[in-house]
Amino acid sequence: MFNRRLQRIRNGFPQQGLDGLMVCKPENRFYLSGFSGSAGMLLITPEQALLITDFRYEQQAHEEAPDYQIINGGTQLTQTVLDQVTALGIARLGFESDFITFDQFNALSEKIKPVVLEPQKGLIEQLRQLKDKEEIVYIRKAIEISDYAFQQVLPLIRPGVLEQDLAAEIEYLMRKKGSARAAFDTIVASGPRGALPHGIASNKPVVRGEMVLMDFGAVFAGYHSDLSRTVVVGNPTKEQQFIYELVLKAQREALIALRSGLTGAEVDRIARSIIIDAGYCEYWGHGLGHGVGLSIHEEPRLSAVSAAVLRPGMVVTVEPGVYLPGWGGVRIEDMVVIGDEGCEILTAATKEFIIL
């Protein structure tokens, strides 16, 4: 698997005019090597694949990245990379321009002369958009874990329970089921706090009659899941019922339309038109969805300005929402994989309007 990915990167070297590529971004490093340590750099040439790390991760690197030559750079990782660049005769070195800081670039430029540094933005991320069979297996498992946590936490949602206690329970359930960690800070936003699209769980207690918006995800073998559901505690009002059905309709229409060949903007427009026609346009201020994989947010984007063309194998979220200040919010989010003729919904958690 990693050899195949390495070859795809190398195949692009002539077009980019590169003799080598330095990879520092953790997700990209993992994608190309399988190495999950927090310190390390890859140096890739047409013939060589080096993983430079330190003492803490040397054994781990040998175990996780057997296709790479492992070099212990001690406390001087960058200098070790530079030494290897010289030893390998690299004249034009690509680097991740959207990850290395300006100061790091300046320092690197001074030390690496006369080697030419060639900025590469999204080179590896572009490959990561199309998931292979192994990746889909891991993503499915992460989704199974978050689906399970949602189902198990429902009996605990009642008047008086704190948002942060629900978040802790969700994260505990995911860990027990095999998640390495929470994919991001768990969102549990009840009542008026539901109008905060990223309302991280607080010490607010849930009150009868309120809606509770939850957004969380698991991580399995490095791959993420992302799930949003909204429930109500006690009998819903007509407005709560209406907003929920509106958001569900917007999502349903987008899911029906999703297929290879559409742009992210075209899919976003389909869902957004439902919200606009109902008079709630100003209360949905984020995009319809985003790619998910080794990062919780990655390309492609489903938004009003996204020119990304959807292709088979892409995994994205579909998550319309309506957020009314002082009232609350509703978001419903599934993950799907794009196919030639449509999409497969990977999320299994029910979307019925749950009344607790």
Image: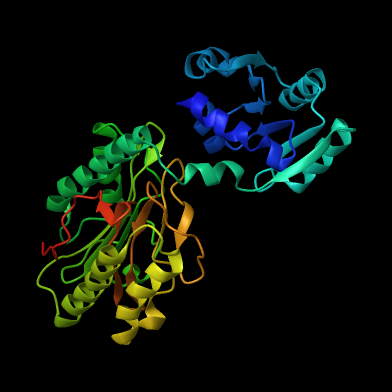
Q: Quadrant of the N terminus?
A: top left
- Identify which residue is drawn at 86% across, 32% down: 111
Circle count: 0
Near-viewer residue (41 or 39): 41
- Identify which residue is drawn at 24% across, 50% down: 347
- Identify which residue is drawn at 45% across, 69% down: 265
- Identify which residue is drawn at 42% across, 43% down: 293
Where is residue 208 shown, x and y percent of the image?
Answer: 16, 68
- Report the side of 294 relative to 9 (left or right): left
Picture quarter containing residue 107? Answer: top right
Where is residue 193 shown, x and y percent of the image?
Answer: 34, 68
Where is residue 218 shown, x and y percent of the image?
Answer: 33, 41
Q: Quadrant of the C terminus?
A: bottom left
Is 31 located above or below residue 165 in the figure? above
Picture quarter containing residue 148? Answer: top left
Is 337 located above or below residue 52 in the figure? below
Picture quarter containing residue 29? Answer: top right
Colouring style: rainbow
Where is residue 343 shown, x and y percent of the image?
Answer: 28, 55
Residue 34 shows up from this direction: no
Residue 304 shows up from this direction: yes
